[in-house]
Amino acid sequence: MESKKIKMSQDADDLKETLNDVDDGDSSLNTLTEEDIQKLISSSKEAMKYAYCEYSNFRVGAALLAEDGSIFTGCNIENVSYSLTTCAERTAIFKAVSEGHRKFKAIAISSEVKDSFTYPCGACRQVMIEFGQYDVYVSRPDSAWQHTTTQELIPHFFSKKALRSVQKAKIQN
Amino acid sequence: MESKKIKMSQDADDLKETLNDVDDGDSSLNTLTEEDIQKLISSSKEAMKYAYCEYSNFRVGAALLAEDGSIFTGCNIENVSYSLTTCAERTAIFKAVSEGHRKFKAIAISSEVKDSFTYPCGACRQVMIEFGQYDVYVSRPDSAWQHTTTQELIPHFFSKKALRSVQKAKIQN
Amino acid sequence: MESKKIKMSQDADDLKETLNDVDDGDSSLNTLTEEDIQKLISSSKEAMKYAYCEYSNFRVGAALLAEDGSIFTGCNIENVSYSLTTCAERTAIFKAVSEGHRKFKAIAISSEVKDSFTYPCGACRQVMIEFGQYDVYVSRPDSAWQHTTTQELIPHFFSKKALRSVQKAKIQN
Amino acid sequence: MESKKIKMSQDADDLKETLNDVDDGDSSLNTLTEEDIQKLISSSKEAMKYAYCEYSNFRVGAALLAEDGSIFTGCNIENVSYSLTTCAERTAIFKAVSEGHRKFKAIAISSEVKDSFTYPCGACRQVMIEFGQYDVYVSRPDSAWQHTTTQELIPHFFSKKALRSVQKAKIQN
């Protein structure tokens, strides 16, 4: 059997068809004003104060901007069984979704790391992309920030569309 | 090498010493009035409406009563990568902790299962006990309920005390 | 609306009907000989040497006895994002299942904790019960051990039966 | 306070300093011969047969090539509490690490999805990068494949270096 090496190419349609009720916009958005970005980063910094980080001693905060303008904050919440820890980003998303929000504009992330920007872990990236394409602002204690998007953070993300295609094929057979 | 079979016995001190700033009370608490229980169950039922359960089609709601009387609700929030799903109980706890609460009186849980009571999964039990001993009320759609406690749900739970004992010994050597 | 307080009672049928192709046996099993128990504990101790515990500095080992007599070992494998850590027990189970085993007789667990026995975390308990009722031996460095079972460790476990009942009802409507 | 927008740039040093005892090589590796790639993909396809996918009905297989040439296979192993599911990639990695391997050359992934390539979920990406930079081959049922690397899959990954920098600073103060 011959194998075919196929060029890697991000399927933009994947995002469009996959995410329910979510406007995915374009992949390079960055639609917030500098003022709004600073406000969101500031909320994420404040959220760090409630971090429950008994085991890592590492505080992270996040602030999620929902489509209607409301902001949901989150911090990391650790557990003696390390695997049951949640990160700041997921906490913020879970809070928002549990209050009926599923469309987001942006998320900001803060930590105590001084020399570099704290990007989300892989688990958070997968949870972030579940709700579509939106802006991500990662910040440093000195308020410098970098911009990226949920989609850029998890190229070729595993999508609902793929899962459904297999499930559908099996039901038909 | 001789082995010694030792009788299983729950170490009550474990709970006391393990949990930071948490009153563990006695292991059979159940301190809420019938009215408060019904109110909490009712909140947990309402929380089900925001469940994001694209993959299981199974709705769960939870309502967590903090020591100061405030209630935090949660629902299950699933993910295309099943492992990144969170349950209703954890969502409620994460919300409360991220708002500065770490002492709880009770949690109520609701689902659509008719013939039996929906008890928390093991992951939620471990997250629940991280914040000590409190009441757990599991309910059915007909509003019948059963009482248990965080400690009863995870006998001989893996504790911070054990983890610390090893870490301390290694630092000293 | 009147609520009914119902006595807590573990549904033995739940285990029987829930677990596919798994003999659940009785809830107090303990069928291994002292020699076999020591052998299994010994395997779990050895497994600790491969623990990847960069963040907790806490080593755990597990050894899982499959129905056909083969033994699968596991250790904890941590991750910089604490939540992506796996425990020794889950590692052993994942190894066995990925080699075609789904029926187990017993699991032994070892750690470096000297003064108490290391019981599984809630996440591992839920993964253990997925494959039915079997013996659990938790040990100390001095080779003393305690016996329990997968079912005792997670009373009123959340079962496949409950999940299916709701899914079925929805498909019919 | 003025914010500074800083150009996004992947810190190659991060990878080098972060990963213990791991050769990170260059970011575009792809060092396997076509024959070895096919062999690895073939192993990952075979591994699918043991998938325990009661809830998703979606089979995934993985095959991990360790530095010494040995291959470890994995499949997805689901759980009634969706969050305790593990994916094929993580199963393969956990198996290898629990047998003493921490340096890898490549991982191949297979699924039943016909129209597209199944890339790892975010959780698996974070576990993959914990052990450094190596090749990733994602395949389709028709044996076509795409190449990427652990690093490309999780740009700006959250690293041990950042975590340590904060922990160190706190101990010194």
Image: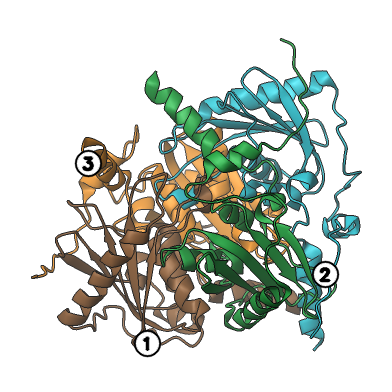
Chain colours: A green, B brown, C orange, D cyan
Q: Label 2's element?
A: loop
- Foreground label between 2 and 3: 2
Give x and y (percent) for residue B6.
42, 65
Q: Which mark is residue C69?
A: none
The CA span between labels 2 and 3 is: 53 Å
Q: Is residue C150 above or below residue B20?
A: above
Q: Is residue C114 visible?
A: no
Quarter occupied by the N terminus of chain D: bottom right
Q: Is residue B165 above or below residue A118?
A: below
Q: Residue at x 61, y 55 (%)?
A: A123
- Please state if C67 lies on the left or on the right of C38 as rendered: left
Q: Nearer the viewer, residue C19 or A158?
A: A158
Q: Is residue D100 above or below residue D66?
A: below
Which SS class for mark 1?
loop
Are the residues flagged by discs 2 and 3 from a single subunit? Answer: no
Q: Amino acid at mark 2?
A: Lys
Mark 1 vs mark 2, CA separation in Å = 43 Å
Q: Pointer 3: what residue?
A: C169
- Label disc, if present, on residue B67 of the rendered structure: 1
Q: Chain of mark 1?
A: B
Residue type at numbered disc 3: Ala
Residue at the image point whose x is 22% and y is 48% from the top: C12
Indicate the amino acid at tag 1. Glu
Residue C53 makes an appearance in the image: yes
- Frontmost of labels 1 and 2 is 2
Q: How many marks?
A: 3
**Left or right side of D27 for B154:** left
Q: How packed is label 2: few (under 14 Cα within 10 Å), some, or many (20 or more)?
A: few
Which residue is tagged 2? Answer: D5
Numbered disc 2: what chain? D
